[in-house]
Amino acid sequence: MEKERLWTRDFVALVLTNGLLFAGFHFLLPTLPIYASDIGATGTEIGVIGGVFGYSAIFIRLFTDTGVRAFGKRKCLYVGLILSILATIGYAVFPSIGLIIAARVIHGFGFGLSTTFAAAMAADAIPAARRGEGIGYFGLGSTVAMAMAPAFGLVLLTDISPTALFLCSGVLTLLAIGTARACHTRPEQADLPVPAIHSSIRNRLYEAGTGAPAVLTILFGAAYGSVNTFIAMMASEAGIESAGLFFIVGTCFIFISRPFGGRLLDQKGAFAVVMPGAVLYLAALLLIIQAKSLTLLLGASVFYGLGAGLLLPALMTWMINVVRADRRSAASATFYNMLDIGTSTGILVLGGVAGTIGYIAMYWYVAGIMGLFLVFGILQRFSGHGNGILKSGIDRRK
């Protein structure tokens, strides 16, 4: 039987939209704290600038159901992208700490909406039998952005000007609107409102039925955020130079693992991808702890790339597959909420731990988190909770 086509015009448009959105975001991730410091921000204020973004994204996702019912997925995506552009302009036009924090809240709203609805529309555009593979490819745009955009952002800030940095970030997000407009998913998938349902704050935070992957996503978010945030400080503590190569090498192996992992999930189920991914990521953490040279650190980045490349799209696909088609926006919001909760909380807690015992020793705690991930995943596999999706990998409800 011939496979349903994956690389449609709609899917390509959404992959590009996602990549451009994340590129605009990652331009600012390492540079905005430096810019804030240059205009007089204290350490506490820089922490607020970093933390308020994730929590504002979580907050706005509580209202994704309301947005879909009122406007449909496509318009909600546009609103998110426009808010992101306005916030980026705000950084340049209002160079004061209070107003930058306010703009960061708006940017969190925009990013929360954009990521949620771009992923939900992509899930609609991907054939059900190839959803694991498709979600893996969908995330490659953000992977490239994570590897390349921070370096370009630093060059713009240090060698040209903050205005050039904010302008380029805004232009990338503007281009994302253009690519999103090239997507013409069927109206019943992307545009029409969905029926209203009664939902509590708890149900708005995470979609019913996604409990197991939600817990795993929080745990992985804590481990993932700790590597992305603290690897440079860990390398400095170990006397290792050129630590930025860690992400470039890791990104190459994310590219290798994602297509393979997606196809494996579609054929064998989530457990066949999530558990090997967790083992690979744990191996990366253990190598980081032992790293005394750039060679060993780059060896760790290989396992980091393979593990993250398997886990992120598999956890998202798992959530999307276990809900009805009209709940995919809520499932997408759940994934990003859990990832942001894990990342933001993990950075906050583990950063405090590192301040006491050092960054290298801190990674033993991160390895412990991935150990909990493995234990919880194995218990879910053999307890029978969510066993159907773990085995089949595909929700047959279109």
Image (spheres, rainbow, N blue to C red):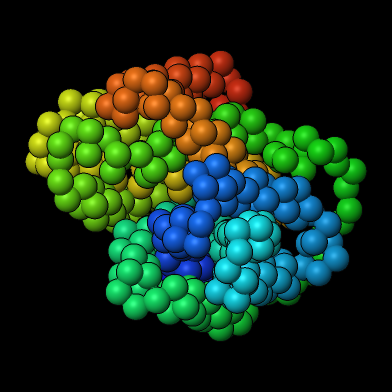
Q: Residue at x 89, y 53 (%)?
A: 196
Q: Position of residue 355 (x, y in %)?
A: 40, 27
Residue 214 lies left or right of residue 247; in this view the side is right
Determine which quarter of the picture holds residue 116. Answer: bottom right
Residue 214 lies left or right of residue 38; in this view the side is right
Where's the C terminus, which quadrant? Answer: bottom right
Q: Is 183 or 45 nearer to us in this picture?
A: 45
Q: Residue at x 59, y 34 (%)?
A: 214
Q: Is 334 or 52 nearer to us in this picture?
A: 52
Q: How many marks?
A: 0
| Res. 22 in view | no
Q: Is residue 362 above or below residue 240?
A: above
Where's the N terminus, which quadrant? Answer: bottom left
Q: Position of residue 81 (x, y in %)?
A: 62, 71
Q: Position of residue 138 (x, y in %)?
A: 46, 61
Q: Position of residue 152 (x, y in %)?
A: 32, 69
Q: Is residue 160 above or below residue 290?
A: below
Q: Is residue 292 above or below residue 97?
A: above
Q: Residue at x 60, y 58 (%)?
A: 97
Q: Is 347 or 368 nearer to us in this picture?
A: 347
Q: Is residue 276 above or below residue 56?
A: above
| Res. 239 in view | yes
Residue 328 lies left or right of residue 352; in this view the side is right
Q: Residue at x 48, y 69 (%)?
A: 24
